[in-house]
């Protein structure tokens, strides 16, 4: 009997956090990382987006992946999980 082929899934989660003005350059040329360093036209209430994208090895394996927390939802290889209009902060999500 031929040996069963094993597939190893590798999930790469790309969390792309886009918060306008959260990192800015101040007048001294130093990079800032706080609300005090926000440009005049930016407030601490600007929103961002989180994108979770699954990648499998070998590529193209079928399946869906469910996440709880923020963001919550299900994604497939063809359709990432996207959550927009998030306030700046720390978010935790877990694949179940």
Image (cartoon, rainbow, N blue to C red):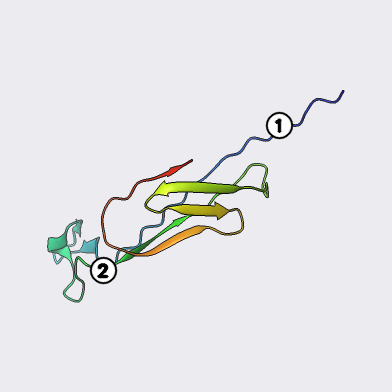
Looking at the image, residue 40 sits to the left or right of residue 6; the answer is left
As measured in the structure, the alpha-carbon distance from the residue carrying label 2 to the one carrying label 1 is 45 Å
For numbered disc 1, what is the local secondary structure? loop
Left or right of residue 46: residue 14: right
Q: Position of residue 50 (x, y in %)?
A: 40, 58
Coordinates of residue 63 in the picture (x, y in percent): 63, 47
Callout 2: SS: loop
- Position of the N terminus, as image quadrant, is top right
Q: Position of residue 46 (x, y in %)?
A: 26, 68
The residue at 68%/35% (across/down) is: 7
Q: Residue at x 55, y 47 (%)?
A: 65
Q: What residue is disc 1 on?
A: 6
Which of the 4 quarters of the picture holds residue 9? Answer: top right
* Residue labelled with disc 2: 46
Mark 1 Cα shell of 10 Å, populated few (<14), some (14-19), many (≥20): few
Q: Seen from this angle, which residue lies furthest right?
A: 1
């Amino acid at each position: 009997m031929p040996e069963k082929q094993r597939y190893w899934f590798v999930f790469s989660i790309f969390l792309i956090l886009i918060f306008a003005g959260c990192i800015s350059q101040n007048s001294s040329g130093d990079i800032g990382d706080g609300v005090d360093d926000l440009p005049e036209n930016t407030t601490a209430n600007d929103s961002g987006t989180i994108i979770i994208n699954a990648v499998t090895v070998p590529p193209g394996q079928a399946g869906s992946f469910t996440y709880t927390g923020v963001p919550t939802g299900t994604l497939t290889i063809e359709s990432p999980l996207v959550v927009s209009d998030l306030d700046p902060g720390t978010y935790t999500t877990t694949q179940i």
